[in-house]
Image: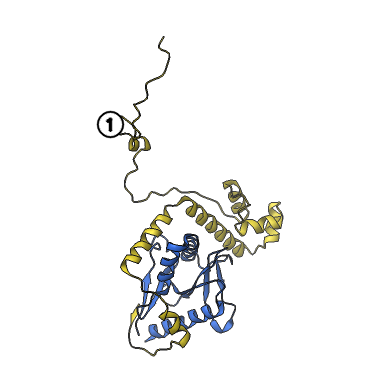
Chain colours: A blue, B yellow
């Protein structure tokens, strides 16, 4: 199994004043950038809204406005969050990697009316895999 | 980070989810770069982002000062509903620079505006861009001077 964290086009060092934002690529699968690419083509408003939240997240210790970022309400997931395209359906799940390198890792995307809890659970699983790999 | 060989912990749901993800090609990434560049130059996007950033910073200042919305609205002489709309970036609330200065001042903050230079090709004047050999793009003869000729 291969695991990488890759840069996200549009988010660079000028934006990343507090956190670096990266997308998780697992076994060559790149769900975050695939979703961003799809939204940029088919739903530019969603794409713009998510990119805005990503910039906000990169520049704050944590995003306080629940309109933009929400933590999973399920305690089993631990600290996993979603970036919200307000009044729209696009969502991007992520977690913070506070331990080492100040990173926000985006793991997966989901669209409202889908199973939000499952999307958070996926993010939590991917976070655990990431942490485990980092240790080894 | 790039890691190989570890204990796979992927469950069936994640495996299925990843299996459905289409490949992201270098062309897709180029397109994504272009889209983000275009977005970064869009005044509406930038204004919306700055508004959200301002609200975020005000929320952080409220947290730091331990002030509730009700308390702050009272101090400001505005209704709690108004403040709530402002903090939720309601489009009906007018975000003037004056409002932002007042709000920031209440939380012992000062608003500043900076215009930043970007590494970009020099901006050509609009008029020069349109003119070709003394004529405009639409082949209209140069305007004659108008005035009292006596």
What residue is shown with label 1? B133
Q: Residue at x 33, y 38 (%)?
A: B129
Return the x and y of residue A26 as percentages of the image width and height.
Answer: 38, 80
Quick one: SS at disc 1?
loop
Q: State the residue in front, B30 or A22.
A: B30
Image location (x, y in percent) of residue A24: 40, 75
Task: Name the residue at 46% across, 87% down.
Answer: B12
**Residue B115 visible in the current orientation:** yes
In the picture as drawn, the residue positioned furthest to the bottom comes out as B7
B149 relative to A72 in the view: left or right: left
Q: Residue furthest top?
A: B150
**Residue B97 at x, y = what percent?**
57, 47
- Residue B148 vs residue B73: left or right? left
Q: Position of residue A130 (x, y in %)?
A: 41, 81
Q: Residue at x 32, y 44 (%)?
A: B122
Q: Quadrant of residue B9?
A: bottom left
Q: Callout 1: residue from which chain?
A: B
* Quarter holding residue B26: bottom left
């Amino acid at each position: 199994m291969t695991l990488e964290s890759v840069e996200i086009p549009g988010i660079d060092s000028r934006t990343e004043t507090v956190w670096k934002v990266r997308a998780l690529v697992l076994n060559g699968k790149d769900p975050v950038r695939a979703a961003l690419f799809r939204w940029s083509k088919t739903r530019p408003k969603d794409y713009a809204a998510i990119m805005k939240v990503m910039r906000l997240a990169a520049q704050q210790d944590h995003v306080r406005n629940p309109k933009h970022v929400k933590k999973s309400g399920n305690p089993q997931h631990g600290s996993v969050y979603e970036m919200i395209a307000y009044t729209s359906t696009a969502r991007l799940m992520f977690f913070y990697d506070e331990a080492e390198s100040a990173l926000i890792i985006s793991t997966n995307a989901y669209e409202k009316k889908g199973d939000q809890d499952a999307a958070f659970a996926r993010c939590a699983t991917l976070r655990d895999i990431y942490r485990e790999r980092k240790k080894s | 980070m790039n890691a190989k060989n570890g204990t796979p912990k992927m469950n069936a749901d994640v495996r299925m989810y990843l299996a459905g993800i289409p490949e992201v090609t270098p062309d897709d990434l180029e397109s994504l770069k272009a889209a983000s560049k275009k977005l970064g130059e869009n005044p509406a996007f930038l204004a919306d982002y700055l508004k959200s950033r301002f609200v975020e910073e005000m929320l952080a200042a409220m947290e730091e000062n331990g002030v509730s919305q009700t308390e702050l609205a009272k101090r400001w002489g505005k209704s709690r509903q108004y403040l709530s709309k402002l903090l939720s970036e309601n489009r009906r609330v007018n975000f003037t620079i004056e409002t932002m200065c007042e709000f920031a001042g209440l939380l012992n903050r000062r608003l500043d505006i900076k215009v930043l230079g970007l590494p970009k090709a020099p901006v050509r004047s609009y008029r020069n861009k349109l003119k070709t050999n003394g004529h405009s793009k639409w082949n209209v003869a140069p305007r004659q001077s108008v005035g009292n000729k006596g």
